[in-house]
Amino acid sequence: MLYLAEVHKKTGFMGAKTELKLLAQKQSEHNWSPISGEEMLQADAANDYNAGVLVLVEMDGNQQLKSIQDATRQLVGILKSFSRMREKFKTQEEEIEGWKQSLIYQSQELTRREVDMEARAEEIQEWDAESQKIEQQRQEFEATRTQILQLKEQMELDRQQLEEGWGRLQNAQNEAQAGLSDEQVRQIEQLLEQLDQSLVNGTSNPDHALASFNQHPQIQEAWQNLDQDRSHAQQQQATLDQQQSELQAAWREWQQTEDSLAQTKLELKVQEQSFTLKEEQKRWLSEQLQAQGSLYETLTQMQGAAGEQADVHKLRDMPLEELEATVEKLNTELVKLSSFVNDQEEELKYQQEAIDELEAKIQNASEYDQLSLTGELEDERQHFRLLDETLEGQRKTLQEREAILYFHQDILYQRKRSQQNKFHQSATLDLAPLVDLAKAEQEKQQQALEKLNQELGDLEASLQVTRNTIEATSAEQDNKRNALKQQEQELENQKTVLAELWGKVKTSESLLQPIQDVVESLKGQEGQQDNPAFSTLNELKQVFMAIGQGS
């Protein structure tokens, strides 16, 4: 066993006696435990040492002194090692403090981004409210414009109907002359003349003359034509009324579909605004996820630099010389890798400068030179991307090697200065909870982003379906409106034809009925020229003469 002892000298009448006071006992390579009490060990072998000198004493299992040596050199080495450890601890404290400050800065930056995102979300809400207000005003304007157009169309329709009415009136007036054929008019005129002569001269029986007049083929044919025209007009009127009712029902159905289409268009605008807001939310969430990933990566690197606990027992049980050799080997490899990565970073920097130079040349080059320079620029960019992708893995490897080296150095320093374990542990930052929290938050945001992407996909599909429905319905509505307009025009044409037919019926009736009335009133009144019926008969003759002349 190895002890640290202090030399004591006692003088007496029989001479000086040398004793050793045991101060500490070595437990392991760098672990000493103090010895309590005032245990003194007589050692004549220490006579050559002065009082107060510290020595290292090796003793066997029976507490017999085996060897003794001066402890000055070893104590100086321990003090130097302690000084280096203090410097190393101070450096590590500064690194940890730097990591803490970086973590605080990143947290503040993340908070600032969250505040910016919240402010941007509020701006988006304000824009949305303003957009809704503008949309409402636009809808009101469109409604007013639609009303004006409807009034304009109604005025145009009224004008057309007025013109058509004037046309129908003119046709009715013309039809009045076409109610009876020219031949029928002349024959009726002759019959009226014969009836007049017969009644005035009394040459024949008046009743017989009137009966002959009524039974004349021309009169009978005129009455038959009148009855046929009236029946035909009534049938056409019934058919036209039914078609008019069906057309009105079709217009009502078309208007209901048009109202439903307008509601669908409004819902489409709401969905499009929702899609825009969700895209903005996706962009914000992607930025948050990127920041969270950067935070997680930083914490992981810090945790790696602080040392993984899985290999602690293995490194503590490893012989000290082997551990020192391992640390030296890791340090040498790290220096080589760091030098290589730095060279690659420098080359990447030169590559970027070459790209910038080519871009500047392209700005001032002619069109012919731009073609060749553009191809060269694309090659340089591709080379830059390949080099950057290669460096990305090398950077990560370098960080891992640094963390492994720090971990081994940490264990080595602990074993070299075990009494500083408490101090070192107090300077070690346990980042595992923060790493777990950052990872959980990153996974949570990733799940939220995936859910939002799913919602965006579903909403986009729904928007496409709605757009297709609106497009198909609009085309169908246009075709149906054109068809209804055509039916409406055909119905108006039928109304014109029917009006002409009714005009013909009324005209024929207005001509034949007075004749019938005169004939009835003249029965048994021959020779009475002062009778009002004779005046009416003369008026009818004048009318038919005028019709005949007009024909």
Image: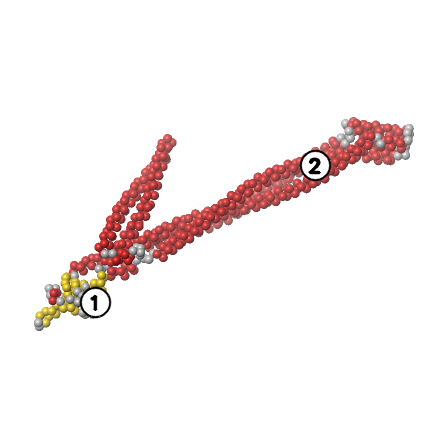
Q: Pick the quarter of the image with the N terminus.
A: bottom left
Element class at badge 1: loop
Q: Earlier in the sequence, mark 2 or mark 1?
A: 1
What residue is pinned by disc 1?
35
Image quadrant in which the C terminus is located: top right
Q: For residue 433, what is the image quadrant?
A: bottom left
Give the labeled residue for mark 2. 495
Q: Residues within 10 Å of mark 1 (few under 14, many from 20)?
A: some
Residue 162 percent coordinates (x, y)? 68, 36
Q: Secondary structure at mark 2?
A: helix
Camera-side residue of 99 and 530: 99
Give the x, y percent position of residue 214.
Answer: 85, 32
Q: Which numbered tag is attached to residue 466?
A: none
Q: Residue furthest left?
A: 14
Between the residue at mark 2 and the residue at mark 1, the CA separation in whole angstroms equals 131 Å
User: Could you tell whether 502 is left or right of 206 in the image?
Assistant: left
Q: Nearer the viewer, residue 551 or 38?
A: 38
Residue 19 location (% of width, % of height):
14, 68
Direction bottom: furthest residue: 13
Quadrant in the rendering for residue 546:
top right
Is residue 394 or residue 342 the one in the foreground?
394
Q: Is residue 402 at least partly visible in the picture?
A: yes
**Vertical placement of 57 versus 510: above or below?**
below
Q: Residue at x 35, y 32 (%)?
A: 372
Residue drawn 23% across the image and 56% down it: 319
Residue 8 picture quarter: bottom left
Question: Would residue 399 appear left or right of 47 to someone viewing this image?
Answer: right
Residue 61 is left or right of residue 257, and the answer is: left
